Image (tube, rainbow, N blue to C red):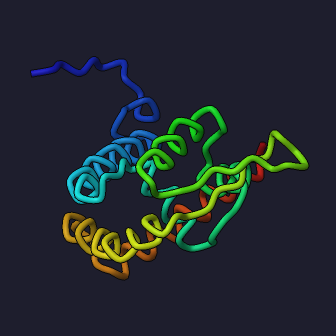
Amino acid sequence: MIETTNTVCEELRLDNQICFALYACAKEIVRQYRKPLEELNLTYTQYLVMMVLWEHGGMTEGQLGKIVHLDSGTLTPVLRRLEKAGYINRIRSKSNERKLFLSLTEEGTMLKERAKSVPAIIQECISLSEEELLLLRDMLHRMLAGMNQTY
């Protein structure tokens, strides 16, 4: 049994931290995605990239990075693996060598049909109603938008 000291103040208790609850939930939900995404030959980050491309179509790496909140250093290896798997094309702009244009291949487009079952699989392992999930999602979007305005 872990002892608690009498000097711990409530504002520094781990269970009282929103950051810890978000961190632990995010880590667990990504773990829940592992099995259904293995069947699609995707990691969680690759799945995020594919969802953006399925929704918006072709775009630059910079545009994608803004949407998924990832920098180029993190995205580059993910995009290379998706290209190697045959799901996307990465094409350098002729007018600006630093711009990388991304587009889905036919195989990447077809993968969308197989991926449609993933959200329902994940929703089954979350003990919240659909209404609660939508409220939580909306609150998290508002929270993220507010934090993005501060820097």
Q: Residue at x 71, y 54 (%)?
A: 101
30 shown above or below 51: above
Please name the residue shown 30% across and 52% down the image.
41
Residue at (29, 68) in percent of width and height: 118
* Outermost right residue: 95
Quarter holding residue 13: top left
Horizontal side of residue 132 vs 76, given as left or right: left
88 vs 61, nearest the viewer: 88
- From the top left corner, tell me how far across and down residue 126 is, in percent: 24, 65
Residue 83 in picture, x, y percent from top left: 50, 48
Where is 124 relative to 79, above or below? below
Q: Is residue 151 left or right of residue 25?
A: right
Hey, which residue is sitting farthest bottom in the picture? 131
Where the C terminus falls, by quadrant? top right
Return the residue found at the far left. 1
* Residue 139 at x, y percent in the picture: 53, 66
Q: Nearer the viewer, residue 78 or 11?
A: 78
28 or 105: nearer the viewer: 105
Q: For the point 29% across and 56% down, which residue is it?
A: 37
